[in-house]
Amino acid sequence: MTCTDAQRPTDQGNARELIGPNTEAGKMIARLNSLTRGMRSEYGLVPPHLVDAVAKHNNMLIDAYHPENDHQIWLLEQVADAGARLDHCQFMIRAQLDDMADRANLCWDEDRARAAEEIAARLPKDPSRTASRLRETAQGCRWILARWDALGVPLLENVGWDEDQCNLAATLMGVGSDLRLSHPLLNPSASSTDQAGLMCAQADAVHTLMVDALEPLDAKERELTRLGYPLRPSKEYLRLQRAESKLRKVYNESMQAFRQARAERVVASEPITCLTPDLEPISLLAARLNGLASEPEPKPEPEAEPESDLSSESPFEGKPIMAMLAALVESIGHGSESPSPTPSPSTVPLATALPRPTAPLNRKARRAREKAARKHKAMAS
């Protein structure tokens, strides 16, 4: 209905008056008009039944973490708000599970029959998919069988179906209006005997499906719902699960932000010191262990070197590595006839003086070692 030129000024004046609340208190009250649970409400809006729980969580977090500035206090308030909502949401989820378990014990068939009625309300608009959904449950099959029984009443009197009854039979079969005209038995001109045969075949198929498959599945689903594991949860239960997932995410993000702010505060308050380790004691210790250096001693005055036989004194005295190499070359050159000179304990490195643990040899390594020993013995002889 369009507005005339005479009515337009009046409607505009009424629209200017209906502008809603203007004060902050009125806006806060208006926000609570459609509040049901308040699980997913934003902008710092705390439901009235959670005010005490949020304050309790906030005091508990402050006593546990001891915030140091206003920013950390604000983050803990966000954590407390999300934690209180999360606890209440989990409580509501458990209450929903208990309610579904109680209804499974007391009024299971009635609830499922009502669900079948809600599905069947869409049967004229979408007969194919709606009839298929009705055949998914035992209660939906009972609903279909009740309509087939009603359609069998005129057939018992040898009276065929009229136009409305043909439409009902077509929808029970899942046949749309565009395909019903092509079906020979779904029109008023068909014989009642043929229509009775069609009805018996459809009713027998639905009854067999209900007895053989759907009723055992219905009993199993009812037992699982009693135990708290519903296969078809309610819409309210699903909404609470989504709210719990969102609140858990908000709680974790707020707590992570608080810990990051606390870590940045600690790092900023500590002075940065760089400690350079003294490497001289480590190098001296390594040199002392390998026999390459000794404790610093005062240098003696130079004296005349006495004449000595070269065979009795090694030219590499004081050089343990060179002395070991010379002894190794001499032992290889003379074989087993001349024993290798044994260096003095003061010149032997600590790494070679200590016994080294030998790993067990496998069969292949033992054979190679024995073969090398035999070859060395043959060359020596």
Image: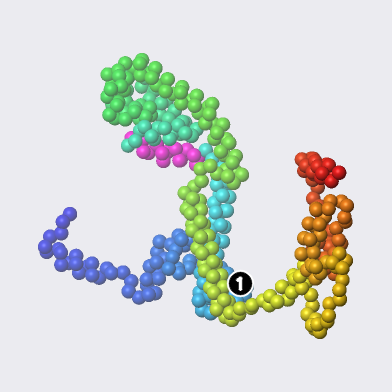
Give, as a single range, the part of the protein colored magenta.
110-124
Coordinates of residue 311 in the picture (x, y in percent):
86, 64
User: Disc 1 marks which residue?
Assistant: 60
Coordinates of residue 61 in the picture (x, y in percent):
59, 71
- In-image side of 200 versus 356 (left or right): left
Using the rendered view, name the quadrant where residue 325 is placed.
bottom right
User: Is the N terminus in the top left, top right, bottom left or bottom right quadrant?
Assistant: bottom left
From this view, report whether residue 209 is shown above or below residue 88.
Answer: above
User: Is the C terminus in the top left, top right, bottom left or bottom right quadrant?
Assistant: top right
Q: Is residue 230 among the parts visible in the rendering? A: yes
Reply yes or no: does residue 119 show up in magenta: yes
Quick one: label 1, few (<14), some, or many (20+) residues within 10 Å? some
- Residue occupying the point 41% across, 39% down: 119
Task: Describe the element under mark 1 as helix, strand or loop.
Answer: helix
From this view, report whether residue 346 is shown above or below residue 235.
Answer: below
Coordinates of residue 197 in the picture (x, y in percent):
39, 17
Coordinates of residue 3 in the picture (x, y in percent):
15, 59
